[in-house]
Image (cartoon, helix red, strand yellow):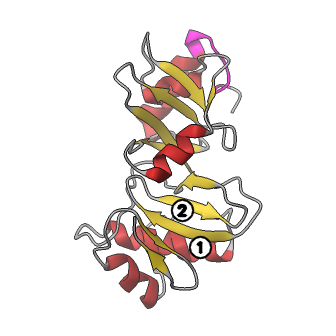
Amino acid sequence: MELLGREDILSQACVGQAMAWDGGRHFPFSGTIEINLDSPHGQEWIARLQPAQARTAQFVRLDLRDGDDALLDPLTDAPVVRRTGGRVRTVSPTQLPATSAFAEVVLDRPIWIRTTDGYLYPAPTHPGDDLGWGDHRNRHLLLAVLLDRLLTDINAEPADGTERAPAGLRKLTRLAWPAGTVLTPGGRRSRP
């Protein structure tokens, strides 16, 4: 954590080495994700971003370049980069810093989790994992386990591939829902 918050070149090199070694498994954030700027959920999340006070080592995984905007998500401290062309990239958390319960999952790119206090977060993942739904590469199984865990503990770690979710969640995430579908624990769903 201390390395991620430093601005010096050696800290940046150390973060780069950790990323090359195991994807930064011990960092509070995992893989990079691109935010869908056409999604109302992506726009909602982007609206809360704040300018970063410094270009610290945590931006290494996002390949921050001259001319890019360095931003931070104030709820997670996740680094965010807005490219000069407008694309927005960030990192997914390995755990949500939430204090209220799971309210809904938004099936989009990326997948979003909303808590009962109204806050929206990118879904937690482990380095190298990619969540999905309705696909044939079993990414829906990781989502099913994550949802099962978050329904019990909002601060749970993401699926690690060793657990099985209940059959109902596996079936639910296997369906080919349209992007933007919102699923709640009560079983209600809505579409954009």
Residue nearer the viewer, 106 or 140: 106
Would you say residue 34 is visible in this rendering? yes
Return the x and y of residue 167 as percentages of the image width and height.
Answer: 43, 89
Q: Which residues are magenta?
A: 3-10
Q: Is residue 110 above or below residue 66?
A: below
Per the model, the C-alpha gap separating discs 2 and 1 is: 8 Å
Three-letter code for the amino acid on which mark 2 is drawn: Pro
Check the image and report above or below for 3 versus 93.
above
Numbered mark located on residue 158 in the image: 2
Local packing at callout 1 (Cα closer than 10 Å; few below 14, some 14-19, many 20+) is: some
Mark toward the start of the polypeptide (2 vs 1): 1
- Residue at coordinates 40% horizontally, 55% vertically from top-left? 129
Residue 162 visible in the snapshot: no
Taking 134 as reference, is 29 left or right?
A: right
- Kindly report the secondary structure that dominates the magenta region of the rendered protein: loop
In the rendered image of this protein, does residue 27 appear above or below residue 119?
above
Residue located farthest toward the left when viewing the structure as drawn: 136
The residue tagged with tag 2: helix, strand or loop? Answer: loop
Q: Amino acid at mark 1?
A: Arg
Extreme residue toward the front, this view: 192
Give the position of the C terminus as an image quadrant.
Answer: bottom left
Q: Position of residue 127 (x, y in %)?
A: 45, 48
Q: In the orientation shown, which residue stands out farthest toward the bottom?
A: 167
Numbered badge on residue 149: 1
CB under 8 Å between discs 2 and 1: yes
Q: Quick one: 110 or 179, which is closer to the camera? A: 179
Q: Residues within 10 Å of mark 2 (few under 14, many from 20)?
A: many
Question: Which residue is painted at 38% across and 27% down in the image?
Answer: 86
Residue at image x 36%, y 85%? Answer: 171
Give the quarter of the figure containing the N terminus. Answer: top right
